[in-house]
Image: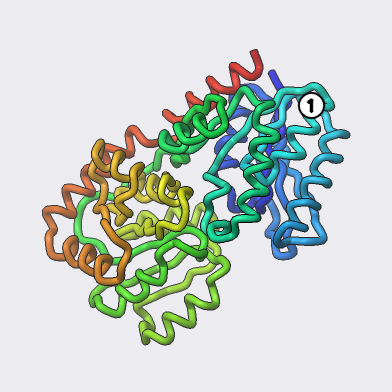
């Protein structure tokens, strides 16, 4: 079997998707190294069945960070033992491609998102152009790639001219899925508190609602701003900022929730064609969700109606959807039952077979 290096630019501690992928490849007999970044506040890593490496960088923001990271990663790969390197997203692609070409090793591309269309880059055409050049320069050297949803796979195949498999970012099968019955009306958001996540609309909706609480599990670029906004709205105990939550604690919180939030502004194509892990995480624990009426969520809710779709992201629309579920126990029970059915299909135990087929082709 192969020695595989998986490269990301984020802290490994919270990367459940990459942890699942690494563990699955180890179970298949591969020798795996998961490589990421060491930040000043990075917590210790738990032992795993694969090696974990963190690169320390002097710079942590903007172009200079990406340049430094790729230089450090390139030289690290030149001295490392590996049979294949998997670059996750465009930000670790240059080092992985160049090192694998020089070493004459195999290479795989993992597109976790539509990198050139993330909200942080929309409206910055020069930066978008640079990342577009990175993609066009290096991706022609790839024959194996995968991404998180069918819509993105179709887009990438057309744009980059290489085939993309679909490996959805679904969780492991939950040991115990929530049963039907009355729950405390906790609305849960899990994920980064970043631009375009619809959290502002959720906070404003809470000012219109009674009898519900909003729990926000995560931190991000807007952490301070969102806390200040909650205070301005006088939300008090109606909103709880939980900070970063460990994976085990996040599972426990999700199981407690009454409704999950997966709200996105249409800031670029990345969010519009997204298929977020939180959508599947809520479903896995029997928690109906509130999602945008974007292509992937529309398609998945057509297969299993596990939540409501919002045609627009406004505080009024969010509040109306919450009231609809609170005032219609029959609808809520039906959505919850659909979650349990979908959970038997949308889980990593089933999804990982596609990942293993891709890597069997790489290793073959």
Q: Name the outermost residue toward the top.
A: 364
Residue 265, horizontal then vertical, whole percent: 40, 60
Query: Of 166 and 189, which appears nearest the observer?
Result: 166
Query: Of 208 and 178, which appears nearest the observer?
Result: 208
Residue 170, horizontal then vertical, whole percent: 44, 40
Residue 244 falls in image quadrant: bottom right
Q: Is residue 46 shown to the viewer in this render?
A: no
Horizontally, residue 161 falls left or right of residue 91, namely: left
Write the residue at 53% across / 34% down.
159
Write the residue at 77% across / 23% down.
105
- Is disc 1 surrounded by few (<14), some (14 to 19) or many (20+) residues within 10 Å? few
The N terminus lies in which quarter of the figure? top right
Residue 158, horizontal then vertical, whole percent: 49, 31
Q: In this view, does 30 lie above or below 200?
A: above
Residue pointed to by mark 1: 101
Query: Disc 1 on helix, strand or loop?
Result: helix
Circle count: 1
Horizontally, residue 139 falls left or right of residue 269, namely: right
Q: Is residue 278 shown to the viewer in this render?
A: yes
Write the residue at 62% across / 33% down.
109
Horizontally, residue 310 falls left or right of residue 327, namely: right
The C terminus lies in which quarter of the figure? top right
Q: Is residue 224 above or below residue 329?
A: below
Residue 167, horizontal then vertical, whole percent: 48, 32
Q: Which colour scheme is used?
A: rainbow
């Amino acid at each position: 079997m192969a020695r595989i290096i998986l490269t990301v630019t984020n802290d490994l501690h919270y990367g459940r998707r990459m942890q699942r992928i690494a563990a699955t490849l180890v179970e298949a007999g591969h020798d795996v190294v998961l490589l990421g970044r060491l930040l000043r506040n990075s917590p210790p890593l738990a032992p795993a069945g694969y090696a974990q490496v963190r690169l320390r960088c002097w710079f942590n923001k903007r172009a200079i960070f990406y340049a430094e990271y790729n230089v450090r990663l390139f030289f690290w790969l030149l001295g490392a033992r590996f049979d294949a390197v998997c670059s996750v997203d465009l930000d670790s692609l240059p080092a992985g491609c160049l090192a694998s070409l020089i070493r004459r090793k195999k290479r795989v591309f993992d597109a976790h998102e539509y990198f050139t269309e993330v909200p942080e880059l929309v409206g910055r055409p020069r930066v978008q152009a640079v990342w577009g050049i990175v993609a066009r320069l290096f991706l022609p050297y790839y024959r194996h790639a995968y991404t998180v949803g069918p819509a993105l796979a179709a887009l990438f195949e057309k744009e980059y001219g290489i085939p993309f498999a679909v490996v959805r970012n679904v969780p492991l099968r939950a040991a115990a899925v929530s049963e039907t019955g009355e729950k405390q009306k906790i609305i849960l958001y899990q994920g980064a508190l970043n631009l375009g996540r619809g959290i502002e609309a959720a906070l404003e909706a809470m000012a219109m609602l009674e009898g519900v609480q909003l729990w926000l599990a995560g931190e991000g670029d807007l952490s301070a701003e969102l806390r200040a906004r909650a205070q301005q709205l006088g939300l008090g105990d109606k909103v709880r900022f939980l900070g970063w939550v460990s994976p085990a604690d996040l599972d426990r919180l999700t199981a407690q929730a009454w409704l999950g939030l997966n709200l996105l502004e249409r800031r670029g194509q990345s969010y519009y064609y997204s298929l977020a892990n939180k959508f599947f995480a809520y479903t896995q624990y029997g928690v109906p969700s509130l999602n945008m009426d974007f292509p992937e969520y529309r398609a998945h809710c057509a297969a299993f109606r596990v939540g409501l779709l919002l045609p627009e992201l406004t505080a009024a629309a969010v509040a109306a959807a919450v009231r609809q579920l609170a005032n219609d126990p029959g609808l809520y029970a039906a959505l919850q039952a659909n979650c349990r059915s979908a959970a038997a299909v949308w889980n990593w135990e089933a999804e990982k077979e596609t990942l293993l087929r891709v890597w069997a082709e790489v290793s073959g």
